[in-house]
Image: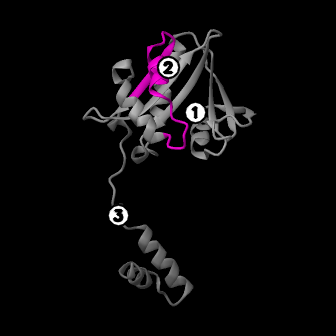
Amino acid sequence: MAVLKKIRSRLFSVDSEDDQCEAINRTEKRPALVAPFNPSYFDVRPLTVAHLDECWQLDQRCFVDGEAYSRDTFEYLLTAPESVSYRAVTPEGAMVGFVVGLVEPDRTGHITTVGVAPEYRRRRIAHKMMGKTEEAFHRRGVQTLRLEVRSTNAGAQALYANLGFVVTQRLPRYYSNGGDGLLMIKALEQ
């Protein structure tokens, strides 16, 4: 920690405002330490009951706040004839994300859960999976999509808004821990 403070003090110790701007510019122009992310690195494939255990275990990691589904719930979701489900995998075949939805009797597509492994978030994986899911719902004659999202989950809300979903209703005490949810809807173009 002392070494880090010493480096910061040398890097940012400047005498004038012009020197300070130059010091900031120098730090901003340094090359990135991480290679740029390539969204095509992950493949989106169908998620079936054959992937039940891997998906359930990933869900437990994604939703540590008590909102993870039970293994039985996943088994139901993945075996239901109205299921629309995908998984994101690395080139080595490891599952890093999943999305599960159902076609409801009124031909509404209900996105029931979307999860991405914590270490793989902010890489457009959920965006890619949602696009594939939307295409599948469209092929099945769905005209409206809906999902629920935690009212405090600004990141997920931004993702869904970017995909064209709009908040239509607040759902008080929707989650088991008493947290509010938001109902978001999107009309699919025909």
Residue positioned 68% across, 34% down in the render: 174
Magenta-tinted stretch: 63-87
Q: Nearer the viewer, mark 3 or mark 2?
A: 2
Q: Which comes sooner in the sequence, label 3 or label 2? A: 3
Residue at 59% over, 13% down: 142
Q: Earlier in the sequence, mark 2 or mark 1?
A: 2
Disc 1 residue type (three-letter) = Leu
Q: Quadrant of the N terminus?
A: bottom left
Q: Give the alpha-carbon distance from disc 2 to disc 1, as whole Å.
A: 13 Å
In the drawing, does residue 46 fall left or right of residue 168?
left
The mark nearer the N terminus, 1 or 3, is 3
Q: Which residue is mark 2?
A: 135
Please name the residue that numbered disc 3 is placed on.
Answer: 31
| Residue 188 locus on image (x, y percent) | 61, 20
The residue type indicated by label 2 comes to Glu
Q: Who is closer to the viewer here, 3 or 75?
A: 75
